[in-house]
Image (tube, rainbow, N blue to C red):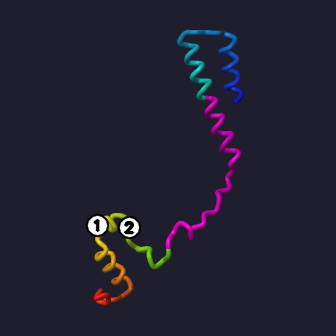
Amino acid sequence: MLAALALLVTLVVWRRQDLLGVVLALLCVLLTMVAGVSVSAARQGNDPEPVDWSAIVGPPELMPYGIDADTLDALDSRDALRAVRDRRRGSTGLSGR
């Protein structure tokens, strides 16, 4: 924060309008952004907010545990997903027919 302020004072006092002035102005903007992000991070603190997983994750009977995203892409049909669920439950897959 102090470095950005010092650069701003330097720009105002020198009143340079050449490449060095542009570089100093860009450096002032960069340092101001870094200072702003640092202040924002300090205000937030290190304590992450607790996440309520019950609201994010659905009921357990609807969640296909043990199946990754690639398998779900391969098993696009409802019949294939139903067969995987039935196999995990230990049925033969003929209970619905």
Using residue 22 as the reference point, say whether residue 36 is left or right of it.
right
Q: Which residues are magenta?
A: 31-58
In the rendered image, which residue does mark 1 sit on?
74
**Residue 51 quadrant:** bottom right
State the residue in front, 79 or 17: 79
Earlier sequence position, callout 1 versus callout 2: 2
x and y percentages locating residue 54 in the rendered image: 57, 71
Please tell me whether residue 50 belongs to the stretch shown in magenta. yes
**Residue 30 quadrant:** top right
In the rendered image, which residue does mark 2 sit on?
68
Give the secondary structure at mark 2: loop
x and y percentages locating residue 47 in the rendered image: 68, 56
The residue drawn where x is 29% and y is 77% is: 79
Give the secondary structure at mark 1: helix
Using residue 2 as the reference point, say whether residue 18 is left or right of it.
left
The secondary structure that dominates the magenta segment is helix
x and y percentages locating residue 76 in the rendered image: 30, 68
Using residue 15 as the reference point, say whether residue 62 is left or right of it.
left
Mark 1 or 2: in front is 1
State the residue in front, 90 or 2: 90
The residue drawn where x is 65% and y is 36% is: 36
Q: What is the number of the mark on residue 85?
A: none
- Badge 2 amino acid: Asp
x and y percentages locating residue 26 in the rendered image: 57, 22
